[in-house]
Amino acid sequence: MIPVTRTFLPDIEEYTVYLDKIWQAGHITNNGPLCRQLADEIALYLRVPNLELVTNGTLALQIAIKVLDIKDEIITTPYSYVATTNSILWEGCEPVFVDIEPQTFCINPDLIEAAITEKTSAILATHVYGYPCDVARIQKIADKYKLKVIYDAAHAFGVKLFGESILQHGDCSTLSFHATKLFHTAEGGAVVSKDAEVGKRVFLMKKFGHIGEDEYLDIGINAKMSELHAAIGLCVLPKVSDIIASRKECSGWYGEQLEGSLLQWPISPVGLEYNYGYYPVIFSSHDVMMKVRQTLMDNGIGPRRYFYPSLNTLPFLKPELKRICPMSENISSRVLCLPLYVGLSMADVGVICGIIRHTLQGGVKL
Ligand SMILES: Cc1ncc(COP(=O)(O)O)c(C=O)c1O
């Protein structure tokens, strides 16, 4: 079986060294020394300020919405994982879907202004597969209408634009360190805030708004990372450059072997230093994609329809929130993310590409 992704597991001996430390300290959660060390090391690696670790990328989004005091309508992308929309709804806000651009599959800045009303308070956009949103234009619109900006950067660990971390943009960026991500802590995430005061509020909110013995300063939730999770992160972080290099190599094999096969890929903007988090391809039609997917699955290969469905079509949305987003609906009906992980061999990529090419050439009846 070749799955779409495989969690990078460090040597167990490395992890047990940290477990010994945890046992000796007797400190297993509540902002322990390993959490503090990991936060510092990630911030240094990414070169970002005000980074707070949290339990997962979904709580990171919810806390960012809460901490920035965002209310009512949030302009957002229909092309993301369901957590992006859910966090908006969970915080009692309304998602206003704005369609995506065809190059990067990120929110289309040309369409944002038309969706702004007097109830709009923020833009929440995803750096899809790690390809950056048009951060300059989005910021310009946000400044004009006094809107907050949150980037769902779950896929954007290590991504740089013109030499700077993409996480520097917006009021907050949120990260997921789920086991499927290229840097992970099994479950985990972080909020990166531009403003140090916002960062302090994130720190407070993620621990019930509670400091000291009995001071309760702000509305809070429990989104603390445990020492056991931080220890995994400390084992994985030193390998991240190698992990990215390995994924780059695999992506290169796909690129060579699928060249000329009439597929569509996201287009990298100028100045991008990519992290090779995903290998998405867009097929010429839904039927072709489904046929390729079935043939891959029949051969023990597990590609993923990611992102599908387009979030503006989620069944639990109120009808008035289901704005039509033709580009997002179109792309999500034709996309497959192909397997990509450390340890995927050139031969595996060869088999996958062989099946895709054979199916596209009509070797399998469509
Ligand atoms: C774009 C995006 N946002 C948010 C999340 C949620 O992250 P988590 O699983 O850590 O809660 C994910 C997870 O896959 C994601 O892909």
Image (tube, helix red, strand yellow):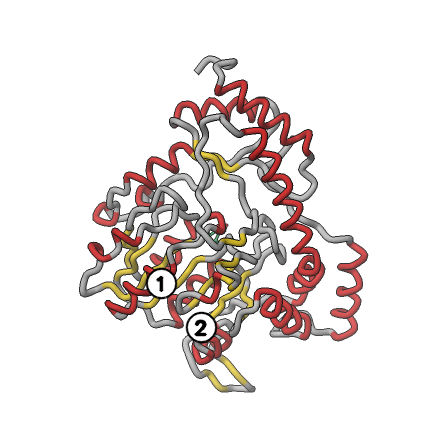
Indicate left or right for 248 with 17 as reference: left
Q: Is mark 2 within 8 Å of ligand 1?
A: no
Which kind of residue does numbered mark 1 sit on? Answer: Glu
Q: Which residue is mark 1?
A: 91
Q: Residue 189, relative to residue 39: is it above or below?
A: above
Q: Badge 2: how crowded within 10 Å, few (<14), some, or many (20+)?
A: some
Question: In the rendered structure, which disc, 1 or 2, sits on the residue that comes first in sequence?
Answer: 1
Q: How many marks?
A: 2
Residue placed most toward the observer, 63 or 139? 139
Q: Residue 186, relative to residue 147: is it above or below?
A: above
Which mark, by number, is residue 123?
none
Q: Residue 341, relative to residue 109: is it above or below?
A: above
Residue placed most toward the observer, 317 or 306? 306
Q: Secondary structure at mark 1?
A: loop
Which kind of residue does numbered mark 2 sit on? Answer: Lys
Residue placed most toward the observer, 183 or 100? 100
User: Are the residues at dot 1 and dot 2 in contact (C-beta closer than 8 Å)?
Assistant: no
Q: Position of residue 105 (x, y in %)?
A: 39, 45
Placement of the N terminus among the 4 image quadrants? top right
Q: Position of residue 283 (x, y in %)?
A: 43, 29
Q: Position of residue 101 (x, y in %)?
A: 34, 45
Q: Which residue is mark 2?
A: 194
Q: Nearer the viewer, mark 1 or mark 2?
A: 2
The structure residue drawn at horizontal position 30% and vertical position 47%, both measured from the top left corner, is 99
